Image (cartoon, rainbow, N blue to C red):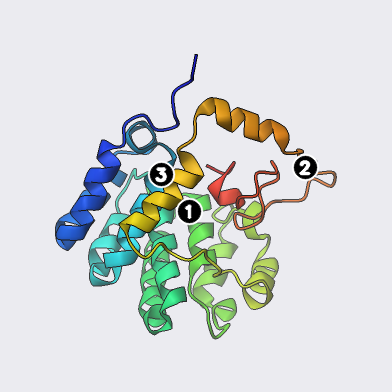
Amino acid sequence: MRKPDLIANTYPLNAVLLLSEHDEASSIETILALLRQGHDFLKLYFGETWSDTAQYIIYKYGMNHLDKLKAFMLEESIYPLAKCTISDALTRKAHDKPSYSEAVRKWHDEVLEFYYEHINNNKLIDSNLITELLGNIPDFDNSIADSELAMKLFEVKDLINEHIYGTYDEWKEYCLHECPNEFEPMPKNISALLRELHDRYFISQEQQELFSSLIPKQRLVDEKIVGRNDPCPCGSGKKYKKCCLK
C-alpha cells in the first residue's frame, strides 16, 4: 500500500501563493498570521514547504513592510524558526540587491538591540535565533566583525549558541572569510517556486525512504560541529538548515 505524500493537501499552499499575486498587504498579513500559529500548525497544513513559501513572500514584498516585520520579531512566544525565516528572506534580498543592504542591516541591528535590552525575557529570547540573526546580517564591507552590539551579545553567558559559529573570535573569522551571506537563487515566480517545491518535497514517503537508503551515510569521525549552511551530514546533498536541522 502506497504511503501518503509528505503533503497530501496543497490547497493552503496554493491559496497563499495566489493571494501573493493579487494583494501585497494582505499577503504579508496572512503569512505573519500563519507563522504565529507555530510549528505543529505549519507542518500540518504546509508540511516541509512552509519556510520556502514564507521566504518567497517576504522576499517579494518585505522591504515595503520592514516595520511590520520588525514588530513581528519583537513579539513574545513566536516559533524561533519562523523568525529566522523572515531574517533569511530579507538577507537574501539584500544579497541579490545590495542597495537594500543598509536597510536590512539596520533592521537586524534594531531587532538584536531590542533582544539585548530584554535578555531576561524567556518568552522572547532564544539563543539559536539570536545566533542566526548575527550570521544573517548583510556584511558586504566586512564591518560587522567590529560591531559593538555583536560583542555585547557574545559577552552575555549562554545568549549565543557557540555550536553554530563558535566563540566571538571564531564568529569574526567566519564573517571575514567564509562568506556567510551565500544563498540559493530565489525562484522568480510562483511557477518556478512550485516546481522547486515539487522536486524537493512532493515525493511519497516510500520513495523518500528508498532514496535515502541509496545514499551512503557520512560518519562524523571527529564530531565536528556542522554549520547551518554546511552540507548535511546525513548525506542528502542539502544544506544542514534545509534538512536535519529542522
- Expressed as whole percent of the image width and height from the top left, the position of residue 236 reads 65, 44
Secondary structure of the residue carrying tag 1 is helix
Q: Which of the two residues, 106 or 188, is positioned nearer the viewer here? A: 188
Q: Are marks 3 and 2 in contact (CB under 8 Å)?
A: no
Residue bearing the label numbered 2? 218
Around disc 3, counting alpha carbons within 10 Å, would you say few (fewer than 14), some (14 to 19), or many (20 or more)?
many
Residue bearing the label numbered 1? 129
The amino acid type found where label 2 is placed reads Gln
**Quadrant assignment, res 79:** top left
The residue under the point 69% across, 73% down is 173
**Quadrant assignment, res 44:** top left
Q: CA distance from mark 3 to mark 2?
A: 26 Å
The residue under the point 39% across, 67% down is 90
Q: CA distance from mark 2 to mark 1?
A: 27 Å
- Expressed as whole percent of the image width and height from the top left, the position of residue 152 reads 53, 68
Around disc 1, counting alpha carbons within 10 Å, would you say few (fewer than 14), some (14 to 19), or many (20 or more)?
many
Around disc 2, counting alpha carbons within 10 Å, would you say few (fewer than 14), some (14 to 19), or many (20 or more)?
few
Q: Which of the two residues, 36 or 57, is positioned nearer the viewer here? A: 57
Q: Are marks 2 and 1 in contact (CB under 8 Å)?
A: no
Secondary structure of the residue carrying tag 2 is loop
Secondary structure of the residue carrying tag 3 is helix
Residue bearing the label numbered 3? 49
The residue under the point 45% across, 38% down is 202
- Expressed as whole percent of the image width and height from the top left, the position of residue 145 reads 59, 77
Q: Which of the two residues, 141 or 167, is positioned nearer the viewer here? A: 141
**Quadrant assignment, res 97:** bottom left
The amino acid type found where label 1 is placed reads Leu
The amino acid type found where label 3 is placed reads Thr
